[in-house]
Image: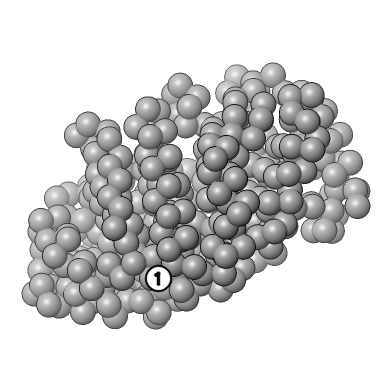
Amino acid sequence: MAVIKVALGGRSYDVVVEPDILPNFAAITDKLLKSDTVCVVADERAWAEHGRRLEASLAQGGREIALYEVASGEGSKSWSELEKLTDWLLEKGVERSDNVIAFGGGVVGDLTGFACSILKRGCGFIQVPTTLLAQVDSSVGGKTAINTKAGKNLVGAFHQPNLVLADITTLSSLPPREMRAGYAEVIKYGILGNLPFFEWCERHGPALVAGDTALLEEAVAQSVSMKAAIVAEDERETTGKRALLNLGHTFGHALEAETGFGNKLLHGEAVALGMVLAARYSARLGNIARKEAERITRALDAAGLPSEISALSLDCDGETLVGHMLHDKKMEGGTLPFILLDAIGKARLDRNVVLDDVAAFLTEELQAH
């Protein structure tokens, strides 16, 4: 078992990483749960696969659940779903001292966290991430949001959970594509700030994606440790340190917007493509060698992740993709910061990127290969 503290003073909390932790849920959370009835917001597929273990644990602890199920997919991160969820939580009498359980992937975590941030001006919640992407990234750090017509995660709040319980066993039910998509966020930590971890991913990525439990536990613990350190230093992205976690996301979100935030391109797949583009654009600027950019491409290829945007067969050009970027929440003073690379394991924030050049670069990538 690994226990990683996210050190934020009075808002500090633990992230517990362990296989088969759900049967011990009631004992671990006993002091955080104030009511005999616990509100659980769950992804419908995750609940069908793993919900009985959490429900049985709470029952043994003398508690019952009130369940709100959310349809899988980014479509649930919407105004309408937020309204329905907050109305339900109010109907159930949730108080500010209560902790709502978010059970599922990043969609449920983001939606529930945002609902809890605004309910009665803020109530508590506990993250129980059941996907690899959520365990290594979205469940930690307090970013919560919904999507709008203008773009992804544009309406939200920083609202830290009171506990994160990452049960590695839940990953066994993930479809291979979702496992690969989550792995993109794992290798991201190596690419942006830890060359030895990137090299570890090069060696173990395919076996990790195939479901090796020991490798998954190590990957989740290492990823969470890196993110926790960055969040503790820059909780609200005010210094630029936390912005490094957005490596691949500016390009990736533009691709997600162009493909409609649907099943054609999962978030992790978009991040993988975004990291390839960030690396290649860094090479275009002369910051890193082209062979280093292609080393990143090969590492993603080896894990079965997409690495060429031309394979998406998008009916657009680079200017269209840059147009999506202009809705990015990181826009400031009419400029858009990019996370670029000076080396594998050394990312930096660049506020001087020329968007016309990015558009030309993307047009070339869309037509390549």
The residue that appears at 90% across and 48% down in the rendered structure is 368
- Measuring from the top left, give residue 26's x and y in whole percent: 16, 67
Q: Is residue 45 left or right of residue 251?
A: left
Local packing at callout 1 (Cα closer than 10 Å; few below 14, some 14-19, many 20+) is: many
Q: Quadrant of residue 251?
A: top right
Between 243 and 7, the one nearer to me in the picture: 7
The amino acid type of the residue labelled 1 equals Thr
Pointer 1: what residue?
170
Q: Secondary structure at mark 1?
A: helix
- Measuring from the top left, give residue 366's x and y in whole percent: 85, 48
The residue that appears at 43% across and 63% down in the rendered structure is 214
- Measuring from the top left, give residue 172's x and y in whole percent: 46, 74
- Measuring from the top left, give residue 81's x and y in whole percent: 43, 62
Between 270 and 286, the one nearer to me in the picture: 286
Q: Is residue 266 left or right of residue 123?
A: right
Q: Looking at the image, is 68 positioned above or below residue 295?
A: below
The residue that appears at 70% across and 37% down in the rendered structure is 278
The residue that appears at 74% across and 37% down in the rendered structure is 292
